[in-house]
Image (cartoon, helix red, strand yellow):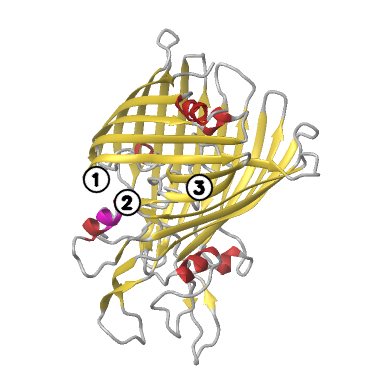
Amino acid sequence: MTIEAQFSRLGEDVYYEGTISSTFSGGDYAPFWFTSNRYGLSSHKNNYGYLRCAFHRDAIADSLRNWRIGYGADLVAAVGMENKHFIVQQLYADIQWKALRLSLGQKERPLELKNQELSSGAMTTGINARPLPQVRLELLDFLTIPGTKNWLAIKAHLAYGWYTDNAWQSNYNAGDKRYLYTSNSLYHSKALFLRIGNKERFPLTMTGGLEMSCQFGGTGHNIHKRVGFDGPEYYDQNLLNGFKSFWNALIPGGGDSNDGDIYSNREGNQLGSWHLRFDYHGKGWSAAAYLEHFFEDQSQMFWQYGWKDMLYGVEINLPKNPFLSSVVYEHIGTIDQSGAIYHDKTANMPEQISGCDQYYNHHIYGAWQHSGYVMGNPLLSSPIYNDRFGMSHNIMVYHSRINAHHIGLSGQPTEEWGWRLLYTHEKSLGSYNAPTPDPQKANYLLAEVTYKPNWVKGLGITASYGHNDGEILGSSNGGMLSVSYSGLFNKKN
């Protein structure tokens, strides 16, 4: 094939979509599920909206070739979104050789081992915050290990990227020297999953694995002086130590700039999850049970204090019927966090007690967040809500010790009509460093109907109702209306 012919195919099978969306609500904030798990393209404010124009070419369009190329751009004009009026939501290129893909840029990536539409979200890297630009090498789908006759397959990725929320962090801090923030931070993630089973030969499969992420490098501003350190009470610090920092992100090691001889740590904000999922594949239906165990350090990465905090889930996909298609139930518990006591070894007390893990919080990087939204499960409250908790300008996760029950339902009554329902009940104790006076509760509801008429191919209309109540985020009711139109440019014959 000539070079011209190879380039000409890049204009084939290009998918386009335009969306206009408006949210109107009354109460303390926009309904929780109007804000959460939307890749950060939302707002906690009562009223917001956007016009979105996107196009992309999936590398699967070249599925009959060894070399495959995909790309995409997703641009948004917004009102009411944290002072953002123009947003580059996605901009990326994918270069794939057989099963191995190099992905460059900023791209929305789906949840690992969970139902994208019905789950409460992932504990480590989810779909709650805006995507980060990154260089990512990945096995996108499970690849059968040669010689195993499809009984063993692996999936993996390795990525480095960077944060784009310098302006948000600086503005949120508002010049208050008491509160830390960072700029030009870097990002690293990696994962390895193993699937055991061949559903064509036996209906039960098991998938397990490990994912880890790290925020590192950049500059820390207004870092508070620790005990035993000389110098000013608040100071700025360059946090990047050249190539060594990239290595310490890959293989956790080194130490933060203010660890000294007293505090034992690993460089950067290190965290991750262990995953385990069992799937039963019936004839026209399926059922799955899964868990995700989150950890902030070695005490919970391994079995030092036992695994008491977990996300448990069950997913059932029913035979085709006009009433109910899929059911998801999840329980999220993060109350323990290795216990309430943290103590580094000292001459007077040489015992190391690695409790008080402070999920999603970090003494230099503030919180596991991007532009105000936690990068994991949104039920651990995002910093954008901190004004309600009396912690304005403080980049931290206040409600990190939670116990929650979450239900997701969806159905497809006809080819044109579909619906989705999310309900979550949450109880919080705040965090170990900032406990609530009494346990606080909340209920979050989303009811959504989508209409895709056969008489206008590509048109989609989604109407949503959202509701909050309880002490955590207060009360609110609202509606969201989204209209989209999509299709293909130059479809390949």
CA separation in Å, label 1 and label 2: 9 Å
Which region shows up in magenta? 164-169
Quadrant of the rendering where the N terminus is positioned: top right
Under circle 3, the secondary element is loop
Q: Position of residue 417 (x, y in %)?
A: 46, 16
- Residue at the farthest left position: 175
Q: Which residue is mark 1?
A: 82
Under circle 2, the secondary element is loop
Quadrant of the rendering where the C terminus is positioned: top right
Q: Earlier in the sequence, mark 1 or mark 2?
A: 1
The amino acid type found where label 3 is placed reads Ala
- Judged left or right of residue 278, residue 442 is left
| Residue toward you, 234 or 131 | 131
Q: Which residue is mark 3?
A: 122
For the point 80% across and 39% down, the residue is 149
The amino acid type found where label 2 is placed reads Ser
For the point 55% across and 19% down, the residue is 323
